[in-house]
Image (cartoon, helix red, strand yellow):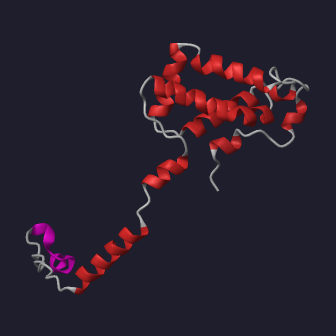
């Protein structure tokens, strides 16, 4: 079995127990403990500067659903120890609204949820049934296939069989 580089560089089991307690962001108390503080943090982070608007718009224009962008932002903040996961889940609708407000301000179309994309790609059952019936009807009608030409036998020095060359 070939060794995968990511497997070789992965931490070994128990490695997290060898560091000093409190060295990781998630091992310390969060800096924001209330939903109001988290809402203010995300409002400043998303609406704060035009550079922040550009970052949000780049993500929205790439086709990522707003819900996914908001989820990524809040999970990253949890990993950095900014707030707890429960505060992040409670503030998630506010993050979504802030992202949509930035997109609306810049007249950028956005997708709210992945189910919206899936609904666009679904063919209605009636339309699919009609398409299958049309295919079956065209399959039953005789279609004349083009006749393929027989390949010509190769000629020349390189086309001779080996036994002819030996004699």
Looking at the picture, tell me which residue is in the foreground, 23 or 54.
Answer: 54
Q: Position of residue 135 (x, y in %)?
A: 29, 77
Q: Position of residue 55 (x, y in %)?
A: 52, 23
Numbered disc total: 0
Left or right, 138 with reference to 25: left
> Is 126 within the magenta?
no
Residue 108 position by quadrant: top left
> Is 162 within the magenta?
yes
- Image vertical order of residue 147 relative to residue 116, above or below: below
- Image vertical order of residue 109 relative to residue 28, above or below: below
Give the residue at the far top of this rendering.
Answer: 49
At 70% from the left edge and 19% from the top edge, which residue is drawn?
A: 41
Majority secondary structure of magenta residues: helix
At 32% from the left edge and 72% from the top edge, which residue is drawn?
A: 131
Residue 24 position by quadrant: top right
At 71% from the left edge and 23% from the top edge, which residue is drawn?
A: 39
Looking at the picture, tell me which residue is in the foreground, 137 or 34.
Answer: 34
Left or right, 142 with reference to 9: left
Quadrant of the drawing holding the N terminus = bottom right
- Image vertical order of residue 136 relative to residue 72, above or below: below
Q: Position of residue 74 (x, y in %)?
A: 69, 31
Question: Residues in magenta?
Answer: 157-167
Left or right, 15 with reference to 156: right
At 87% from the left edge and 24% from the top edge, which residue is drawn?
A: 29
Quadrant of the drawing holding the C terminus = bottom left
């Amino acid at each position: 079995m070939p060794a995968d580089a990511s497997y070789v560089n992965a931490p070994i089991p128990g490695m997290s127990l060898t560091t000093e307690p409190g060295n990781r962001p998630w091992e310390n108390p969060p800096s924001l403990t209330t939903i109001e503080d988290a809402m203010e943090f995300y409002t400043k982070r998303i609406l704060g500067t035009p550079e922040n608007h550009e970052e949000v718009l780049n993500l929205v224009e790439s086709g990522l659903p707003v819900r996914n962008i908001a989820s990524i932002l809040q999970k990253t903040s949890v990993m950095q120890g900014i707030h707890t996961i429960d505060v992040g889940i409670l503030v998630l609708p506010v993050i979504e609204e802030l992202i949509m407000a930035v997109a609306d301000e810049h007249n950028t179309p956005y997708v709210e949820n992945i189910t919206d994309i899936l609904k666009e790609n679904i063919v209605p059952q009636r339309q699919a049934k009609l398409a299958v019936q049309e295919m079956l009807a065209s399959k039953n009608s005789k279609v004349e296939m083009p006749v393929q030409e027989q390949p010509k036998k190769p000629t020349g020095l390189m086309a001779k069989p080996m036994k002819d060359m030996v004699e």
